[in-house]
Image: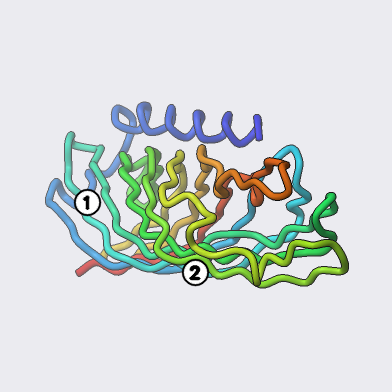
Amino acid sequence: MKNTIKTVAAIALLIGLGSTKAHAQINNGKAQFGVKGGVNFSNMYSDNVDDNNVLTSFNAGIYALIPITEFAAFQPEVLYSRKGSELTYDNAFATGSAKFKLNYIEVPLLVKANLTKNISVHAGPYLAYLIDAQVTNQSSGGSLNFQENYNNDDFKKFDAGLSAGLGLDFETIGFGARYNYGLTTVGKERSVGGATYTIPDGKNSNISVYMTLKL
């Protein structure tokens, strides 16, 4: 994940440079509102969980674009975003795989800058609230079945992290790609048979590809 952090930092730096080197004023200096939606490619990163399987899901919501300088703007969003992963596990309690589908209301708080007339970059933090968790399980042994033993109370309600991405903007529509780097462990600590563990002990990692429509 070190390379991911460097990438997020590099894009954030580009935004600062873009505010002085951009060639096109964002939305002619006017506030903009719109809707957006797309596809998520989600995973969880952890030192202790095999997280090679990506969960494909979706995101949808609304956004605003509020100019703060001639070439930079504040872009808050409110999204419904499904994240998660398919994790394999092999421990004292169970062996098998589980699919975690985590449905969030997500609020990115971004700064956007135009690099050219149609190309933009954005970066900033995001906050998210878990509204529902769906777990399916295929266990080949052990005493723990995620589907039977897990519910919404076993996951942390709040998530937070960093976002950065690129956009291709036209008069009424746009396209973009974004990476979300979670900073909060998804699962809560549990105690079973005197032992304490956290499953899933990973943090959200999500790439989204989306389209925007200006209202």
Q: Amino acid at mark 2?
A: Phe
Name of the residue lying farthest toward the front = 194
Q: Nearer the viewer, residue 157 or 193?
A: 193
Is 210 situated above or below 26? below
Q: Is residue 31 left or right of residue 86?
A: left
Q: Position of residue 153 (x, y in %)?
A: 48, 58
Q: Amino acid at mark 1?
A: Leu
What mark, if any, has residue 65 been given in the picture?
1
Q: Nearer the viewer, residue 65 or 56?
A: 56
Q: Secondary structure at mark 2?
A: strand
* Rendered image quadrant of residue 35: bottom left
Q: Secondary structure at mark 1?
A: strand
Residue drawn at the location 65% of the way across and 71% of the way down: 148
Crowding at mark 2 (Cα within 10 Å: few <14, some 14-19, many 20+): some
What mark, if any, has residue 76 been given in the picture?
none
Residue drawn at the location 46% of the way across and 46% of the way down: 165
Residue under label 2: 58
Is 124 situated above or below 156? above
Name of the residue lying farthest toward the left = 30
